[in-house]
Image (cartoon, rainbow, N blue to C red):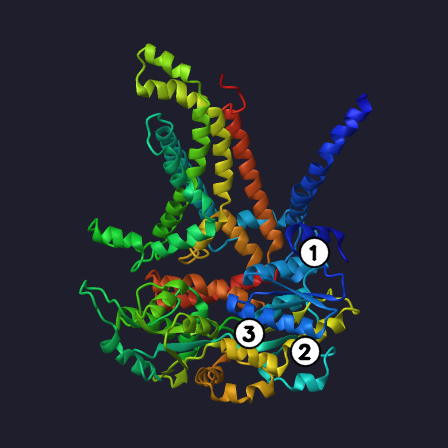
């Protein structure tokens, strides 16, 4: 195969993927950038024009209900709390499942992956029913078996937000568990044998072998998890029934959804989604650089 | 296609979006429930059997997805030929110029055969022809528990002794007189109108900070906290389950729910919502037609075929098929006058409720008003706001949102 044929062959393989990427990623992205600088809305949907950074100014300066900065803070709390629980529970369960003497390992693995396998909207609506004050199973457990007063999960803003977080924690840990389990299984057993010979404790082995060696896999997973959680519209929207009570359980992405599809503020929603994009991009770059995720572990 | 950028965006955003270049292939987008879909499907197959050279494809989309999807597709010069939904879609679609006026495309004798409420006009043009009238709330009662549904608020409250009961002795009621979905302001409208309130003026200016709103909110709060005849918390699903399980003797729900209660084996009856004695006014729900609008992108060559389908679906016998299967109120005079509609107990009461109902505004501003009402309505039921404060904040927020909507 001469050089030209070789290059043509490479192009032949790459072009279809590139065309699809162009169509489903680059073009919509550039289109979103364009309308974020426009006045596209209910009254200007066909005759929209560029209005500079007006929509970006509105994002940061316009008083909104609920307040943009409060929603932003809530989004950060939502993402951080979820991620901490996803990773801690996921890695802990992976460590348990990675033990050699665990009986019924395939069964446990299947059961623990179940939350991830069920469609999100079913999970969200089921949990919403479970959080009902009078008839939900969570309050029945709290009152009957723990002898505590029932919690108004869906009526108070803090509790409703907590309900969304609990649902998403349940939904999200299996992903981290699967990733961590894969990483754990790739660690050579000789390293642990050598540590045993040196008299290392369980904690020392975890700190000096396990965690450093699963890090290259976990860091990209955490980055992905952050982006997914930050943008997880389904759970917040369905568990809180579109921001209940009183629009107090929004995160930025559900705020964007309302602006775009309830009030047809396409320009404003596009600007807000660009702000979200830049925030996530900055976080990802900073996080990957700080954690040196791209460096080899061995 | 006027804007190639929008065309590509439409194609990208809408998997399964129909471009329908084939003049003998008609695409309908609708938001019908499963039971409605089965009826529609059989009717479309009847149409295809009568017109062997035409095929019809019906695509279900959830109401919000239908609305946003149709906007994106139609702006890009694409989309279905017919879009089906409640009449409040007409306002935004008309403003965006994505649905076609129908009055010049259909003959006057055909249009004259509809009851006026079946034809939705906006800014002087006909934009939607309905096959069903209603989409309205009624009082639905369990006939195994109640023989005579209440006709006034006082009769309703007096039912507390008989129905709000702690059956298992745990100190909490296990059965209630009444329930409904507390989270959506659509369900608050009958209480608002019962106390003389309404959502907006004819030109779309919100009228939420009124005594009607305040007293309506107080009344609901009293039903729950003072008279204890409704549960402490209920969304649509919870209310539905309570009624189906016999844990609530009555429910306020829409005509869409009747077929489901029949299927669930509930021995139910339908009655108009009660009158408020102190005001002398009926609790009037919003009433809206549900029907078809024509996409502006349908070519002139294709229009006759699409309109022939529309005429078929509006035939009195087709509307009666739907009415028999789903208890929906038809819109053709001939179907309305039929024995079935005139004598069926549920449809007679449905007609009474429609009489005691108010037409849902089709202006786009209604969307902003729902959005403005929802948080404060929920806050009153959650105990976070007083009715007076809620009414004031609803009004302020509605004004702000309408400004945003029309920016």
**Badge 3 local density, few (<14 within 10 Å), some, or many (20+)?**
many
In the figure, B253 relative to B400: above or below? below
Q: Which mark is residue B361?
A: 3
Residue that carries the numbered disc 1 in the rendered image: A48
Q: CA distance from mark 1 to mark 2?
A: 36 Å
Mark 3: which secondary structure? loop
Q: Which mark is residue B345?
A: none
In the figure, B316 relative to B297: above or below? below
Q: CA distance from mark 3 to mark 2?
A: 26 Å
Please name which of the two marks, 1 or 3, marks the residue nearer to the observer.
Answer: 3
Q: CA distance from mark 1 to mark 3?
A: 27 Å
Looking at the image, do the residues carrying marks 3 and 2 touch, with CB atoms under 8 Å apart? no
Judge whether residue A167 can be spotted in this image.
Answer: yes
Residue that carries the numbered disc 2 in the rendered image: B311
Locate residue B82 relative to residue A9 in the image: left or right: left
**Badge 2 local density, few (<14 within 10 Å), some, or many (20+)?**
some
Instruction: Specify the subunit that label 1 lies on.
Output: A
Asked whether B319 or B172 is in front, the reply is B319
Q: Are marks 3 and 2 on the same chain?
A: yes
Q: Are marks 1 and 2 on the same chain?
A: no
**Of callouts 3 and 2, the N-terminal one:** 2
In the figure, B128 relative to A123: above or below? below
Instruction: Specify the subunit that label 3 lies on.
Output: B
């Amino acid at each position: 195969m001469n050089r030209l044929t070789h290059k043509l062959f490479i192009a032949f393989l790459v072009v279809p993927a590139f065309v699809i990427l162009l169509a489903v990623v680059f073009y919509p992205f550039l289109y979103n950038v364009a309308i974020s600088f426009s006045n596209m809305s209910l009254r200007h949907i066909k005759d929209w024009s560029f209005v500079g950074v007006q929509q970006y100014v509105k994002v940061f300066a316009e008083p909104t209900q609920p307040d943009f900065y409060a929603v932003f803070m809530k989004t950060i709390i939502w993402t951080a709390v979820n991620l901490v629980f996803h990773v801690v529970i996921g890695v802990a369960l992976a460590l348990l499942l990675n033990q050699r003497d665990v009986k019924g390992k395939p069964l446990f693995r299947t059961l623990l992956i179940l939350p991830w396998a069920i469609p999100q909207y079913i999970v969200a609506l089921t949990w919403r029913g479970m959080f009902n004050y009078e008839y939900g199973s969570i309050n029945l457990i709290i009152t009957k078996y723990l002898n505590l007063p029932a919690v108004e999960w869906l009526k108070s803003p803090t509790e409703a937000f907590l309900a969304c977080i609990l649902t998403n924690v349940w939904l999200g840990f299996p992903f981290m568990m699967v990733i961590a389990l894969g990483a754990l299984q790739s660690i050579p057993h000789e390293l642990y044998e050598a540590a045993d010979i040196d008299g290392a404790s369980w904690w020392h082995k975890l700190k000096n072998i396990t965690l450093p060696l699963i890090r290259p896999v976990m860091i990209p997973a955490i980055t992905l998890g952050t982006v997914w959680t930050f943008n997880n519209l389904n759970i917040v929207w369905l568990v809180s029934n579109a921001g209940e009570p009183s629009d107090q359980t929004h995160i930025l992405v559900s705020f964007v959804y309302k602006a775009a599809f309830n009030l047809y503020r396409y320009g404003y929603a596009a600007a807000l989604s660009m702000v979200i994009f830049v925030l996530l991009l900055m976080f990802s770059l900073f996080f990957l650089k700080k954690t040196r995720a791209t460096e080899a572990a061995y | 296609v006027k804007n190639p950028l929008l065309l590509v965006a439409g194609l990208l955003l809408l998997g399964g979006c129909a471009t329908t270049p084939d003049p003998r292939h008609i695409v309908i987008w609708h938001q019908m429930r499963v039971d409605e879909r089965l009826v529609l499907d059989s009717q479309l197959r009847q149409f295809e059997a009568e017109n062997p050279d035409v095929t019809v494809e019906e695509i279900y989309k959830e109401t919000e997805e239908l609305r946003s999807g149709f906007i994106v597709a139609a702006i890009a010069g694409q989309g279905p030929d017919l879009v089906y939904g409640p009449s409040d879609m007409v306002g935004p679609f008309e403003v965006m110029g994505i649905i076609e006026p129908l009055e010049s495309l259909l003959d006057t004798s055909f249009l004259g055969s509809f009851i006026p409420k079946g034809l939705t006009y906006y800014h002087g043009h006909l934009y939607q022809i309905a096959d069903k009238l209603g989409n309205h709330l009624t009082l639905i009662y369990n006939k195994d528990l109640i023989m005579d549904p209440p006709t006034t608020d006082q009769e309703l409250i007096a039912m507390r002794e008989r129905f709000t009961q702690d059956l298992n002795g745990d100190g909490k009621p296990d059965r209630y007189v009444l329930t409904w979905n507390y989270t959506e302001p659509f369900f608050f409208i009958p209480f608002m109108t019962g106390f003389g309130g309404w959502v907006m003026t004819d030109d779309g200016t919100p009228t939420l900070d009124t005594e009607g709103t305040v007293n309506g909110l107080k009344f609901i709060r009293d039903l729950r906290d003072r008279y204890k005849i409704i549960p402490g918390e209920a969304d649509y699903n919870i209310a539905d389950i309570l009624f189906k399980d016999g844990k609530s003797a009555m429910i306020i729900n829409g005509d869409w729910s009747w077929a489901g209660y029949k299927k669930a084996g509930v021995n139910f009856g339908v009655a108009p919502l009660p009158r408020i004695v102190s005001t002398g006014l009926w609790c009037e729900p919003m009433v809206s037609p549900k029907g078809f609008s024509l996409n502006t992108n349908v070519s002139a060559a294709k229009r006759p075929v699409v309109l022939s389908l529309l005429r078929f679906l509006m035939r009195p016998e087709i509307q009666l098929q739907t009415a028999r299967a789903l208890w929906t109120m038809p819109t053709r005079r001939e179907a309305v006058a039929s024995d079935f509609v005139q004598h069926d107990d549920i449809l007679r009461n449905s007609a009474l409720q429609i009489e005691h109902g108010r037409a849902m505004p089709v202006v786009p501003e209604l969307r902003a008003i729902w959005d403005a009402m929802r948080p404060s309505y929920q806050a009153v039921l959650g105990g976070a706001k007083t009715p007076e404060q809620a009414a004031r904040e609803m009004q302020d927020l509605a004004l702000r949102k309408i400004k945003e909507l029309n920016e």
